[in-house]
Image (spheres, rainbow, N blue to C red):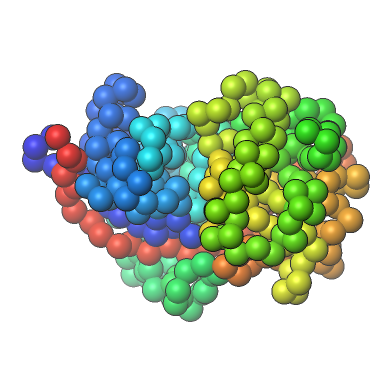
Amino acid sequence: MSDGIRCMLLRGGTSKGAYFLAEDLPSDPAERDDLLLRVMGTPDARQIDGLGGAQPVTSKVAIVSPAGGGDSDVDYLFLQIGVEEATVSDRQTCGNLLAGVGQFAVERGLVPAGPESTSVRVKMVNTGSIAVSTFATPGGVVRYDGGTAISGVPGTAGTVELEFTGTEGSVCGSLLPTGNVVDEIDGVPVTCVDNGMPVVVARAADFGLTGYEPVGELAGNRELAEKIQSLRLKAGKLMGLGDVSAASVPKTTLVAAPREGGAISTRTFIPLKPHPSIGVLGAVSVVTALMLDGAAGHELFAAPAPGEPVGVEHPTGALEVGVDLGPGPRVLRSTIIRTARKLFDGTTFPRP
């Protein structure tokens, strides 16, 4: 590894990560994970000696390879790299980094580009579900610039349309892993849901919060962090995830009534640090839960007109999500608009 490793750094949605071809990394998972920790500069709160940006949303890795079979074009393995702790987790996927996978696949020659736009069928290896990413490729070249703005990212970039199918229960095995629309944990009503991301949804008011607190205020609340940890540890067992003390899932989202024209206000924790916005599949799962009668926070949900996207308010703006539910309930389809931008393409040198 003294000659470095080929790597592309992309912003995908409101996250940033290092993208690699699987063939450029060790095939042994233990060797691969050790290498990635050194690439990202973990463990270190500043990640000063690596590519990581000192927070969970910038300490992420996407590993892309040709499709191993089925009806996908490429396989995408997501790894969440710890910041202060030397952890590498594959127990969740990342819908934000997904927004750059198709472009990376085209740039690396895994998928041919269309003359105007390209749709790439991506198998999310962590969950086994399929997403279709569509983006502009005028003249057969990936175009990253454009006029689409998303909250949490300055400026504008090209539109990336993400469509999800088969995400229901992709981690826990069912949409409602506990078998209930609502459970009570530590005296708090919660809804445990998995529509691509295991999430525990609860009312912010039940934690003595308004649900509109800034991230910095939440980050400094040690009592809140202890309550969130207790909640997620118990929820993890109820959801069939076992001991989640060293895992980043389930995530916890506290909800409040919207106040910026959306359908719900959210504050999300990964696993204990407040998220500056909200993850793509996290938002999809939260919206899915709130659409269910009797769910924790359902009465706070200002449902839009049929066919209109759901505005999910978060600390840095809002995210628009589409979820189609059928009888059962069954998730028929989920959609979201993201953007992505190539930041760097070249060689990274891991610390010894």
Q: Quarter of the image containing the N terminus?
A: top left
**Residue 157 locus on image (x, y percent):** 44, 72
Q: Nearer the viewer, residue 324 or 297?
A: 297
- Image height of 99 relative to 180, above or below: below
Classify residue 10 by image quadrant. Answer: bottom left
Q: Nearer the viewer, residue 324 or 271?
A: 271
**Residue 285 locus on image (x, y percent):** 69, 46
Identify the residue at image location x=30%, y=54%: 9
The residue furthest left is 3
Q: Quarter of the image containing the C terminus?
A: top left
Identify the residue at image location x=78%, y=33%: 186
Classify residue 197 by image quadrant. Answer: top right
Identify the residue at image location x=59%, y=22%: 243
Horizontal relation, residue 347 to residue 70: left or right? left
**Residue 108 locus on image (x, y percent):** 28, 49
Classify residue 65 by image quadrant. Answer: top left
Identify the residue at image location x=45%, y=48%: 56
Does residue 293 show up? Answer: yes
Q: Nearer the viewer, residue 10 or 257?
A: 257
